[in-house]
Image: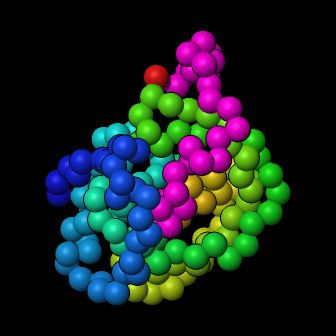
Amino acid sequence: MALRNILTDRDPQLRKASRPVTEFNDRLFTLLDDMKETLELANGVGLAAPQVGVLRRLCLVDTGEEVLELMNPEILETSGEQDGIEGCLSVPGRYGFVLRPNYAKVRAQDRSGNWFEVEGEALTARCLIHEIEHLDGHLYTEKVTRYLTDEEMKEYGVEG
């Protein structure tokens, strides 16, 4: 496994739509393993392939119980509403309030190409949607209603 560089929001590649994953092979497995190691070392809860310079429709989401590997994910259903603090490994040091659904149901393929569905609420729903938006070339900064001040970041215990 190898650590991958995480692109920052200044990189135009993050604004491009990703192509579907069509080959489920050793190259994909290596990318997924590298991304998982990168995510863990960065202390993140999600990471999309475009963030490491690969324009493919795949992402990882850490639910707290497991790290989901999602190839070609599609949002099937959302409901409810949550207004919470969001950040991004590609936007270091900036956090803001983003309104998101409180529930999300997603259909995706696993590393072998098998389709499955996953549901999540609260932070997991937020992360699923956030990472899937990366695959379409969008960043959470497009949806921020208000950025946290330095004082608020200290109060909420997030690093600036």
The residues colored magenta run 133-159
Quadrant including the N terminus: bottom left
Residue that appears at 73% across and 47% down: 99
The answer to whether 45 appears left or right of 155 in the picture is left
Disc count in the image?
0
In this view, the residue in front, 140 or 123, is 140
Task: Please determine whether, in this image, residue 2 is positioned above or below residue 154.
Answer: below
User: What's the image's color scheme?
Assistant: rainbow
**Residue 19 seen in render:** yes
* Furthest residue toward left: 2
**Residue 63 seen in render:** no
Task: Please determine whether, in this image, residue 89 is positioned above or below residue 25.
Answer: above
* Furthest residue toward top: 151
In this view, the residue in front, 67 or 13, is 13
Reply yes or no: does residue 64 show up in magenta: no
The answer to whether 4 appears left or right of 97 in the picture is left
Reply yes or no: does residue 135 show up in magenta: yes
Task: Please determine whether, in this image, residue 57 is positioned above or below residue 156.
Answer: below
Q: Position of residue 101 (x, y in %)?
A: 74, 56
Q: Position of residue 111 (x, y in %)?
A: 36, 77
Q: Position of residue 132 (x, y in %)?
A: 53, 64
Residue that appears at 40% across and 44% down: 9
In this view, the residue in front, 64 or 52, is 52
The image quadrant that residue 42 belongs to is: top left
The answer to whether 26 appears left or right of 159 in the picture is left
The image quadrant that residue 55 belongs to is: bottom left
Residue that appears at 54% across and 81% down: 116
